[in-house]
Amino acid sequence: MLSKFRHKFLSQWELQVMVWPSIILMVVFSFVPMFGLVIAFQDYSPLSGFTGSEFVGWDNFKAFLGDNDFYNVLTNTLGISLMKLLIGFPLEIVLAILINQIRLSFFKKFTQTVSYLPHFLSWVILGGMITSWLGSTGLLNSFLLSTHLISEPISFLSNANAYWWIATLSDIWKEVGWGTILYLAAIAGIDPSLYEAAKVDGAKILKRIWHVTIPGIKNIIVLMFLLRVGSILGANLDQTLVLQNASNMPRSEVIDSYVYHLGLAQGDFSFATAVGIFSSVVSVTLLLIANVLTKKLSDSSIF
């Protein structure tokens, strides 16, 4: 057994040399730090450390589920994430198909570049731009006042009820172009003879998209949908921190920012870790459910 393993290892030593550094780095930086999750079951004190802190079992999880802020934070997280999923996800597919239909090469590259550009800007820069545009003397208020659609300036970021839409639309603006890359690559891989055959059969452009393009990128659509569902409880911490203020806090506080405020601002590391574990477990559960559903509906899945 050992000699067989050694023979196989030596026969492919070049591949082993390339793979093992990655495996070691993944174990050191991804799996070893997971030992720290034990503080979710402790009343952790940095002075006492992992071994000296008192073990409290499920108390931190019970405290989170019984917290008055729990349902508000969960509702905000699910609401914002679902809006991003239901609006942003299909928009990426539609934009990729529209870009693919552009025949002028220069205009096609220009459109792609313009749509990708916001992705490379950090939320610090975009947050400053959005705060400026949506302020009382910002671009949007100036336009609405000049067109007499409103009589007084509106401070949009101070309006808690408007926050979900602001978070959703600003996230779509930043990421929708970047999200088209995989779909454009998948569309480029479709056999051109299928389009020619559809043309011969008299199919117009919409029918060619429906019967050739969509089935050709179906697997990528399923893959991206499952990845989106798996991160549905992650409502983008960077975006939340730059757009959040005291006025919109009731509708802008999500699980990630809740963990950040508890863990770093208040130093309640055990409670924050318990909330983080809860979020991860729910995300994995949603991913598995979505994987089963997509496998039944489209015969495509990632597991």
Image (cartoon, rainbow, N blue to C red):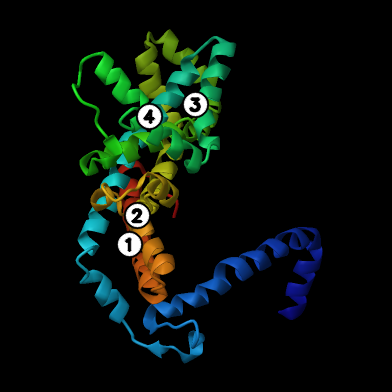
**The disc label shown at residue 233, or none:** 2
Chain-order first, disc 1 or disc 3: 3
Instruction: Indicate which label's residue lies in the foreground, 2 or 1.
Output: 2
Circle 1 SS class = helix
Instruction: Please name the residue shown 24% across and 38% down the image.
Output: 162
Residue type at tag 3 = Ser
Name the residue: 80% across, 63% down: 13
Q: Are marks 2 and 1 in contact (CB under 8 Å)?
A: yes
Q: Nearer the viewer, residue 288 or 278?
A: 278
User: What is the spatial separation of the Cα atoms under label 1 and label 4, in whole angstroms?
Assistant: 36 Å
Amino acid type at mark 2: Leu
Under mark 4, the amino acid is Trp
Q: Position of residue 93 (x, y in %)?
A: 41, 30
In the image, residue 123 sits, relative to residue 136, either above or below, namely: below
In the image, which is nearer the foreground, mark 1 or mark 4?
A: 4
Q: Position of residue 114 (x, y in %)?
A: 52, 23
Asked if disc 3 and disc 4 are in contact, CB closer than 8 Å, the reply is no
Left or right: where 299 falls relative to 251:
right
Callout 4 secondary element: helix
Q: Earlier in the sequence, mark 4 or mark 2?
A: 4
Return the mark for residue 282. 1
Q: Amino acid at mark 1?
A: Val
For residue 115, the mark is: 3
| Left or right of 78 in this view: 272 | right
* Figure check: 176 above or below 123: above
In which quarter of the view is residue 149 placed? top left
Q: Earlier in the sequence, mark 3 or mark 2?
A: 3
Residue underneath mark 4: 133
Q: Nearer the viewer, mark 3 or mark 4?
A: 4
Instruction: Tell me which label, 1 or 4, sits earlier in the chain.
Output: 4
Q: Residue at x 23, y 63 (%)?
A: 69
